[in-house]
Image (tube, rainbow, N blue to C red):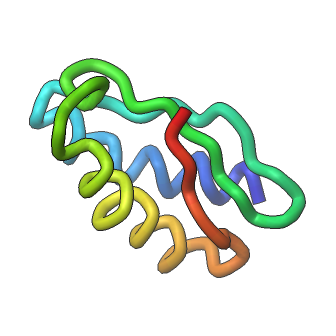
Protein backbone atom coordinates (compact mmCIF):
# COMPACT_ATOMS: atom_id res chain seq x y z
CA UNK A 1 0.00 0.00 0.00
CA UNK A 2 2.91 2.38 0.69
CA UNK A 3 3.95 2.32 -2.99
CA UNK A 4 0.39 3.17 -4.09
CA UNK A 5 0.20 6.04 -1.60
CA UNK A 6 3.59 7.36 -2.75
CA UNK A 7 2.45 7.26 -6.37
CA UNK A 8 -0.80 9.09 -5.52
CA UNK A 9 1.10 11.75 -3.56
CA UNK A 10 3.40 12.24 -6.55
CA UNK A 11 0.31 13.06 -8.61
CA UNK A 12 -0.93 15.57 -5.99
CA UNK A 13 2.46 17.22 -5.49
CA UNK A 14 2.36 19.52 -8.58
CA UNK A 15 -0.86 21.13 -7.31
CA UNK A 16 0.75 21.87 -3.95
CA UNK A 17 3.99 23.05 -5.54
CA UNK A 18 2.09 25.58 -7.68
CA UNK A 19 1.18 27.25 -4.41
CA UNK A 20 4.65 26.99 -2.88
CA UNK A 21 3.97 23.92 -0.76
CA UNK A 22 4.64 20.22 -0.76
CA UNK A 23 3.75 17.01 1.06
CA UNK A 24 6.10 14.45 2.57
CA UNK A 25 5.04 10.89 3.37
CA UNK A 26 5.96 9.97 6.94
CA UNK A 27 4.20 6.64 7.48
CA UNK A 28 1.44 4.32 6.30
CA UNK A 29 0.02 2.13 9.04
CA UNK A 30 -1.39 -1.37 8.59
CA UNK A 31 -4.88 -0.08 9.41
CA UNK A 32 -4.84 2.50 6.58
CA UNK A 33 -3.76 5.68 8.35
CA UNK A 34 -1.49 7.80 6.17
CA UNK A 35 0.74 10.23 8.06
CA UNK A 36 2.13 13.16 6.11
CA UNK A 37 4.01 16.37 6.74
CA UNK A 38 2.98 19.48 4.82
CA UNK A 39 6.00 21.61 3.95
CA UNK A 40 6.82 24.91 2.29
CA UNK A 41 3.96 27.39 2.10
CA UNK A 42 1.53 24.69 3.30
CA UNK A 43 3.28 24.52 6.66
CA UNK A 44 1.43 26.85 8.99
CA UNK A 45 -1.02 28.02 6.31
CA UNK A 46 -4.51 28.62 7.72
CA UNK A 47 -5.95 26.67 4.79
CA UNK A 48 -3.65 23.66 5.22
CA UNK A 49 -6.27 21.53 6.99
CA UNK A 50 -8.74 22.16 4.19
CA UNK A 51 -6.06 21.30 1.60
CA UNK A 52 -5.25 18.14 3.52
CA UNK A 53 -8.90 17.04 3.65
CA UNK A 54 -10.20 18.17 0.28
CA UNK A 55 -7.15 17.52 -1.88
CA UNK A 56 -4.76 15.06 -0.29
CA UNK A 57 -7.11 12.79 1.66
CA UNK A 58 -9.85 12.78 -0.99
CA UNK A 59 -7.42 11.88 -3.77
CA UNK A 60 -5.67 9.20 -1.72
CA UNK A 61 -8.98 7.54 -0.80
CA UNK A 62 -10.04 7.65 -4.45
CA UNK A 63 -6.83 6.02 -5.71
CA UNK A 64 -6.04 3.74 -2.75
CA UNK A 65 -9.31 2.44 -1.24
CA UNK A 66 -7.50 0.96 1.79
CA UNK A 67 -6.71 4.48 3.07
CA UNK A 68 -8.94 5.24 6.05
CA UNK A 69 -7.68 8.72 6.89
CA UNK A 70 -4.78 11.12 6.45
CA UNK A 71 -3.12 12.82 9.42
CA UNK A 72 -0.77 15.78 9.26
CA UNK A 73 2.16 15.76 11.66
Position of residue 55 measured from the top left corner of the image (x, y, whole percent) = 30, 61
Front in this rendered view, residue 21 or 13: 21
Left or right, residue 22 beside residue 25: left
Q: Residue placed farthest to the left in the image?
A: 19
> Residue 39 location in percent, x, y?
36, 23
Figure quadrant of the C terminus = top right
Left or right relative to 47: residue 60: right
Q: Residue at x 47, y 49 (%)?
A: 9
- Give above or below for 34 relative to 43: below
Residue occupying the far front of the picture: 46
Q: Which residue is drawn at the image coordinates 60% and 65% (left, top)?
A: 69
Count of numbered badges drawn on the protein: 0
In which quadrant will I find the N terminus?
A: bottom right
In this rendering, the answer to whether 48 lies above or below 39 is below
Quadrant of residue 48 in the image? top left
Residue 25 sits above or below residue 3 on the image? above
x and y percentages locating residue 71 in the rendered image: 56, 49
Left or right: residue 70 versus residue 27 is: left
Name the one closer to the observer, 62 or 10. Answer: 62
Image coordinates of residue 70 in percent, x first then y, are: 56, 56
Question: Which residue is rendered at x = 55% and y = 38% of the image?
Answer: 36
Identify the residue at image location x=44%, y=45%: 10
In this view, the residue farthest toward the top is: 40
> For this view, does 42 lie left or right of residue 67?
left
Amino acid sequence: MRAEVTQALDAIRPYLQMHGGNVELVDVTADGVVKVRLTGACQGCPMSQQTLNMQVEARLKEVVPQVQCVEAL
